[in-house]
Image: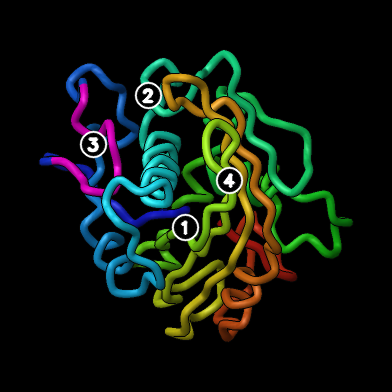
Amino acid sequence: MASQVVPGKVEGDKYRSFLDDEAHTTHWRHGGPPIYDAVNKLFEQGRTKEWPEGSLEETVQNAIKSWEMELSHKTRVQDFKTINPERFKLFVNGREGLTAEETLRLGSYNALMKNSLPEEYKYYKAEEETFESSHEAFRSAFPRGFAWEVIKVYSGLPDIAYKFRHWGFFEGPYKGHAPTGNMVEFYGIGTLKVDSLMKAEEVEIYYDPAEMMGGLLAGKKTSDDNTKTSQGCPFSK
């Protein structure tokens, strides 16, 4: 769920909560709450579903967007409003779960893109990336952001199962690969376990990373890839 944002004054966001709640006491990564105008426009233009206001589908969609916002832009777990920090775990493609602090330290891209492939086949080396370098790489590739939508919800509270779609346009360079201008998208399945206050305790995500990275690595090589991330196959967030 990556988004292209710029810090600034926030008047509220119709898809994300907790942007302006206690904004003056929250520790923001870039000095203030982010603005999601560009990726919201991309989302509205490209979504395949428009869920009724107040529906379970809209609730789940906005809850995940709000969690991703906090993970990307808040620097202290104590400022998170979307999760139960003592119980929270993130599981990706069956790997060992990450705590809230571990997920925040790694960053969303590194947490989602970590893999155990042999070195020669790694398309992305999360262990060699920082929070900042990983986000900068994908902000460069997707100048308008990387939109996210819920396609279907299979079960309700408190153990929610859903299908999602992630998409953007490869319009900027990615680690020595020239942009193609093409849409890059992938689909996945997720589960979200929430407590009585609707705060996330467990998030599980399953998807095929090759669906996204294949689109990025298809770009013509413009230079030797001397950056920290790999040179091979595909993945995404």
Q: Alpha-carbon distance for marks 4 and 3? A: 32 Å
Q: Determine the image quadrant of residue 143.
A: bottom left
Q: CA distance from mark 4 to mark 2?
A: 23 Å
Identify which amino acid the numbered label 3 is placed on.
Pro
- Marks 2/1 in contact by CB < 8 Å: the verdict is no
- Helix, strand or loop status at disc 2: loop
Give the residue at mark 3: 33
Colouring style: rainbow
At horizontal 63% and vertical 69% (from top left) the residue drawn is 213
Q: What's under tag 1, amino acid-wise? A: Val
Front residue of 233/22: it is 22
Residue 85: x and y in percent read: 52, 18
Query: In the rendered image, which quarter is residue 177 located in?
Result: bottom right
Q: Which residue is mark 1?
A: 150
Which residue is labeled 4 in the image?
155
Precedes in sequence: disc 4 or disc 3? 3
Which of the marked residues, 4 or 1, is nearer the chain's N terminus?
A: 1
How many other residues sit within 10 Å of disc 3, few (<14), some (14-19) or many (≥20)? many
Instruction: Tell me the element at label 3.
Output: loop
Q: Secondary structure at mark 1?
A: strand
* In front of the other: 179 or 190: 190
Q: Nearer the viewer, mark 4 or mark 1?
A: 4
Query: Is residue 52 one of those drawn in magenta?
Result: no
**Mark 2 against mark 1, which lies toward the viewer?**
1
Q: Nearer the viewer, mark 4 or mark 2?
A: 4
Q: Amino acid at mark 4?
A: Ser
Magenta residues, start to end:
12-21
The image position of residue 231, as x and y in percent, is 71, 68
* Residue denoted by label 2: 81
